[in-house]
Amino acid sequence: MNSRKLLSEAQRTFPATNVRCQQPSRILIVDVTSPSWTNTCSVLAEALENALCLACSLTGPCRVPLLSLYVVQNQQECLLPFTQVKENFARIQACVSELRSLPREGCFPQWGNGVVQAVQDGLQQFKQYSRHTATGGSTNSSVEVTILTSQSSKEMVKQLEKKLKDVDLVSLRRIQVIEVLKRDFLEPEDVEQCPPAEEPSSSDIAILGMDIDVQTIEDNVISLEMLFKTWLHDYGTEREHLHLLLPSGGFSHATAPKTTPMCLKCDLQERLLDPALLSGMVDGTVRAADLSSPCQMAAWPATVLYKLWVVKALKSEGVCESILYGLPFIIKPTSCWRLDWDELEINQHSFHALCHSLLKRKWMLLAKREPQNTSPNWNIMVHSYYIIVPSDSASLLVKAVAIRELLLPSTFPALPAEHPERVHGAVESALNSLEVEVAYNPLHLKSNLYKYLKSMLYKPLHRQQAQPRDPRPERHQPKQHQGRAKATVAPLLMAPSPVQVLRPAAMRRDSCERSPLPKEYDEFLQ
């Protein structure tokens, strides 16, 4: 059993509801008292800015609904109170700029209680924010805390265990303690760093009825960027995403009726971000895929339960890459908390057994998707088909496969056995000049996509500043007075604790005009 089963018992007491946004809010706590902060500062700021520009650019429901950022120096300081991530990139970048400007190594003594007090204060701030926005229809009720530190993660966990005994943790879903390792001899481009696994590792610790996930990563941009990108995954555990149905024959249990198909309950996970979902990447002629299409399956948002019926097994060498299309998805055993432990365990073991059997036989599976009745006008059901590919990890890969109606005629003439020697020599010379790699690593390629998205996120703000002002005078409410009134709202709503120094980046005098207040504050003023 994986340690996701260590979910808070308080979470299990919530009744079943139609939750619009199951993504948790985020509290990021950065411990800058460590000796290696001088190396971590710049790479952390770049990685955080890159990941959040993706979160701000993705269309659809926001994958990071709220973000708060603390730094721990000689005392904790809130650089960013809880802010809606979408449409607030300018405010977020002002906070990242302030993070970059913090004093470097040797300026702050290590103080053990600062991180714990930041956790306590962040949870209190989240409770206050949730209370003020409850009337606005906000459905987000959970928060995750990520602590970045170069101190010993074991010591950090002991402090959390000791200090959080009497704190209300109902809204807390998980705490991540990330121990950042100093590796001066590695450059980001030279590191083949795999993304942190979404499934918690054996170092997870269950205390206080919650999960504490302990990880270690290197202090380079790629590692930290992949850590923050895990926030973009679907964290909803209200229901499973996919039912993989296998024939009853050799797969059924001895106690199950022979006519009952075996049902593996699975979750879908994105392997790649769909470029069509990035704002600014879609022009007037290209649109994001229609999720109601019978030939389209999506892992985000997980609003539909898909059913795939396995109809055939295929030899792995008998599938041509040219007939596969669309984005791939990862299939994993479900972590839905509504299932009891025994059912989760049996389901997981059955899934792993299927992976082993497919690898041993060198098979792929051909599956037919059960159509969804998305429209009452559909009198004919259109079926789509998928290829399921095994791997040596505890997961499967699913990808759409062409059907008769979509296939175009193509002729592939045989390759001639003879060719002119002078041409062959030129081609061989060109190939010999290429650098050869054993495997393709996408982390080695850059496309300037981050720079492009950041420029697109700034355009609306620039256009707004370029608009001519109304020549009519504002008689009853001068602009200066109005600006001062708005600037004092956040401290009133988000009252800091006595040990906290609240200094929102967007409230500074040099950035208040460029960084608008969150929508909740405007509603409060009205």
Image (cartoon, helix red, strand yellow):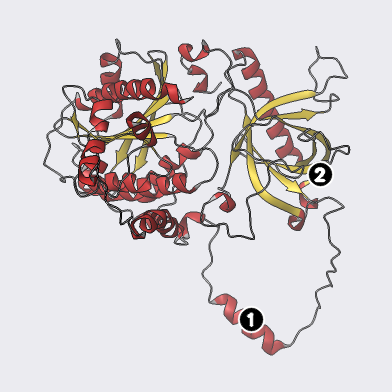
Q: Please provide percent x and percent y for residue 1.
A: 56, 20
The residue located at (51%, 23%) in the rendering is 4
Which of 62/487 is in front?
487
- Quarter of the image with the C terminus in it: top left
Which of 353/111 is in front?
111
Residue 173 seen in the current view: no
The residue located at (79%, 82%) in the rendering is 418
Residue type pointed to by label 1: Val
249 left or right, relative to 322: right
Which of 417/474 is in front?
474
Q: Which residue is mark 1?
A: 427
Q: Which numbered circle lies on residue 314?
A: 2
Query: How many callouts does the rendering have?
Result: 2
Q: Please provide percent x and percent y for residue 204.
A: 42, 24
> Quarter-wise, where is residue 99 in the image?
top left
Residue 162 seen in the current view: yes
Looking at the rendered structure, the secondary structure element under dot 2 is strand
In the current view of this chain or complex, which residue is farthest to the bottom? 422
Tell me the distance, in whole angstroms, between the alpha carbons under discs 2 and 1.
36 Å
The residue located at (34%, 33%) in the rendering is 521
- Relative to 460, residue 416 above or below: below
